[in-house]
């Protein structure tokens, strides 16, 4: 077993139910080493990154868990994803997620393509029926593909794992937390990875090594 790292959660600053401090507390109890708060943003509300940072600073100083300010670029025109990613980074987002072309939402076609071509992006969330070419670009630009624990978004997990394994792209397991019951411990994350078709020998890499490498690259851990 290892410490849990979740790079995709939502607080009250978008459509989540929890304050950043409650996400931190619940994640800490579940054995998390780190959790990123990546609220939904587009051009209208990207300044909310600063609100998360204010909360994160207090938590970092007082609790033994790394809380990371981030953003999830969501349902934005594919053409402006690079611009929004750069803006989020300038505002202090340390982890940038893009809301991928999940099977259960009308995400704009081309979102996956734009995301994997943007070096500012860290994680392409629930990318649905991602193509091999897109996965190769994700590998080339060091962008992780997400195995999602969220209902609906998880329907594409098997395809995502298969394609990622075939091209050598990195995978991470995230919850896309919106409510208290969405956060999961390491054991449950392992089961979700295995249920998605990930070989058992790859579980530690996907749950520990890959997210840790993202954080170390950013100088967070």
Image (cartoon, rainbow, N blue to C red):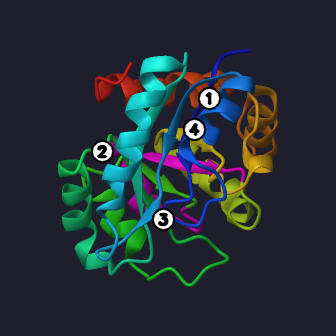
Q: Is residue 126 visible?
A: yes
Contact, CB < 8 Å: mark 3 with mark 4?
no
The residue wearing badge 3 is 99
Locate residue 162 relative to residue 47 in the image: left or right: right
Q: Residue at x 66, y 31 (%)?
A: 25
Which is closer to the viewer, label 2 or label 1? Answer: 1
Q: Residues within 10 Å of mark 3 (few under 14, many from 20)?
A: many
The residue wearing badge 4 is 21
Residue 142 point in image, percent of width and height: 33, 40
Q: Distance between the Cα atoms at labels 3 and 4?
A: 24 Å
Which tag, 2 or 4, sits closer to the chain's start? Answer: 4
Which is closer to the viewer, label 2 or label 3? Answer: 3
Which element carries disc 1, helix, strand or loop?
helix
Which tag, 3 or 1, sits closer to the chain's start? Answer: 3
Contact, CB < 8 Å: mark 3 with mark 1?
no
Residue 113 point in image, percent of width and height: 35, 68
Q: Residue at x 52, y 72 (%)?
A: 101
The residue wearing badge 2 is 140
Q: Residues within 10 Å of mark 1 (few under 14, many from 20)?
A: many
Which element carries disc 2, helix, strand or loop?
helix
Q: Residues within 10 Å of mark 4 (few under 14, many from 20)?
A: some
Q: Distance between the Cα atoms at labels 3 and 1?
A: 20 Å
Which element carries disc 3, helix, strand or loop?
strand
Q: Quadrant of residue 72?
A: bottom left
The residue wearing badge 1 is 207
Q: Distance between the Cα atoms at labels 2 and 4?
A: 35 Å
Q: Distance between the Cα atoms at labels 2 and 1?
A: 21 Å
Residue 53 point in image, percent of width and height: 35, 42
Q: Residues within 10 Å of mark 2 (few under 14, many from 20)?
A: some
Quadrant of the rendering where the C terminus is positioned = top left
Locate residue 188 relative to residue 105 in the image: left or right: right
């Amino acid at each position: 077993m290892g410490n849990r790292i979740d790079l995709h959660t939502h607080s009250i600053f978008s459509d989540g139910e929890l304050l950043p401090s409650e996400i931190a507390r619940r994640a800490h109890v579940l054995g998390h080493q780190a959790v990123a708060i990546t609220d939904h943003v587009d051009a209208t509300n990207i300044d909310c990154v600063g609100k998360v940072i204010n909360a994160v600073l207090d938590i970092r100083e007082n609790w033994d868990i790394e809380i990371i300010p981030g953003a999830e670029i969501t349902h934005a025109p594919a053409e402006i994803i690079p611009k929004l990613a750069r803006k989020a980074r300038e505002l202090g987002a340390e982890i940038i997620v893009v809301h991928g072309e999940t099977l259960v939402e009308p995400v704009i076609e081309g979102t996956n393509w734009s995301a994997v071509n943007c070096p500012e992006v860290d994680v392409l969330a629930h990318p649905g029926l991602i193509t091999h070419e897109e996965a190769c670009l994700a590998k080339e630009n060091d962008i992780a593909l997400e195995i999602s624990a969220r209902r609906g978004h998880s329907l594409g997990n098997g395809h995502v794992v298969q394609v990622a394994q075939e091209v050598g792209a990195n995978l991470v397991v995230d919850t896309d937390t919106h409510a208290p019951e969405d956060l999961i411990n390491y054991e449950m994350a392992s089961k979700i990875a295995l249920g998605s078709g990930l070989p058992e020998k790859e579980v530690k890499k996907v749950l520990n090594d890959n997210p840790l490498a993202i954080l170390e690259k950013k100088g967070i851990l």
